Image: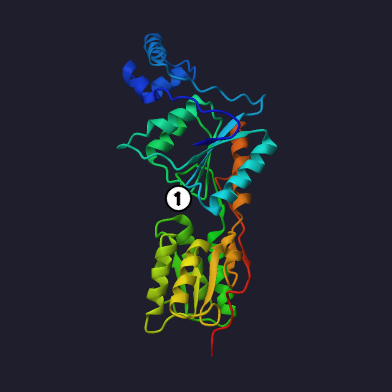
Amino acid sequence: MVRTGGTSVAAGPTLAVVAREAGVSVPTASKVVNGREDVAPETRRRVTEALDRLGYVRRPRFDAAKPPGLVDLVVHSLETSWSGAVLHGVEEAAHDAGLEVVVSAGLPRNRGDRPERGWLDKLIARGSSGVLFNLAELTPSQYAWLEQHRIPFVMIDPVLEPPPGVVSVGAANWQGGVTAAEHLLALGHERIAIIAGHRRRMCSTARVAGYRSALASAGIRQRPEYVRYAGFDEAEAHHRMLELLDLPEPPTAVFVCSDRMALGVYEALATRGLRVPDDMSVVGFDDLPESRWLAPALTTIRQPLSEMSATALRLLVRMMDGKRPEGTRTELSTRLVERASTGRPRG
């Protein structure tokens, strides 16, 4: 965990532990913590004594009259340029809002169906006013924990479809898939393959669906053997590209659903003595700095990572102020960035 502008605070017991100590349900303990009136006096006394005995740290209520001081950002990793773009967007928007940001790399694993205590308890202890999750896959118990503690949160590019009512921000992945395929079709390619990420991930399924839609609209027969999945892993993409090259009728172009995977595709083509775009046109997705460093520079679909993150932070601030967004899903546009990795097919 990294904190900007402060130090972390030791965690105390969870509300579930307090409820068990007092012999009540978690919702009842939550009512006492939040000052609700619909609790019997004897029950309130037992919960209050358990709170004091266990040293439970009560979360400060958000005061709309004062600017919120602290929000949490949970990213999948701190080692990628993707995360760097997300951090840049959040930090700029947080500075404008007068907020400090605590950054954590990944959510701790759960034990059974109970949320891991460490990070969630620290969230309460340090008095964070809200949370941004980037590429996170929350469990039902974690969603429930956040709701029980009335902690506003927004998902940035969620891995799976969030539950109803959960606010999220993402890119127009379906349209990005359409745009990538249409670009290759316009150059004259008909044998177009796709190397996607994870089969279950929202962005992957949307990009593959967009690719399929563009081919169908152009009257191009869709070949199941041209659709491969590499889990957003560079080495896996390398293997998938070799598999495509070994087909009886290999593709003349490939849409790779992340710039990082495109690195592996370039390496696979080089091992076979093939050139980009003379022998194979390649389109990526993301427009990370890596796309400009490749030789030739990668044609890619830009998704506005920093803008997505800044939008999520602004939505979170509104929610912390008690204002519910009009819709739960916000999508920002993608666009084609044409460079040197695509051209007309040979012959």
Mark 1, Cα crowd under 10 Å, few <14 / some 14-19 / many 20+, is some
Residue 304 sits above or below residue 227 on the image: above
The image position of residue 63, as x and y in percent, is 62, 24
Label 1 amino acid?
A: Glu
- Secondary element under disc 1, as helix, strand or loop, is loop
Give the residue pinned by disc 1.
Answer: 161
The image position of residue 104, as x and y in percent, is 49, 39
The image position of residue 216, as x and y in percent, is 49, 75
Residue lying farthest to the right in this orientation: 96
At x 45%, y 24%, the residue is: 10
The image position of residue 160, as x and y in percent, is 44, 50
At x 54%, y 30%, the residue is: 128
Q: Quadrant of the C terminus?
A: bottom right
Q: How many marks overall? A: 1
Judging depth in this view, the residue of 189 and 210 nearest the camera is: 189
In the rendered image, is residue 319 in sight?
Answer: yes
In the rendered image, is residue 149 in sight?
Answer: no
Judging depth in this view, the residue of 213 and 332 nearest the camera is: 332
In the rendered view, how is the structure colored?
A: rainbow
Residue 109: name its quadrant. top left
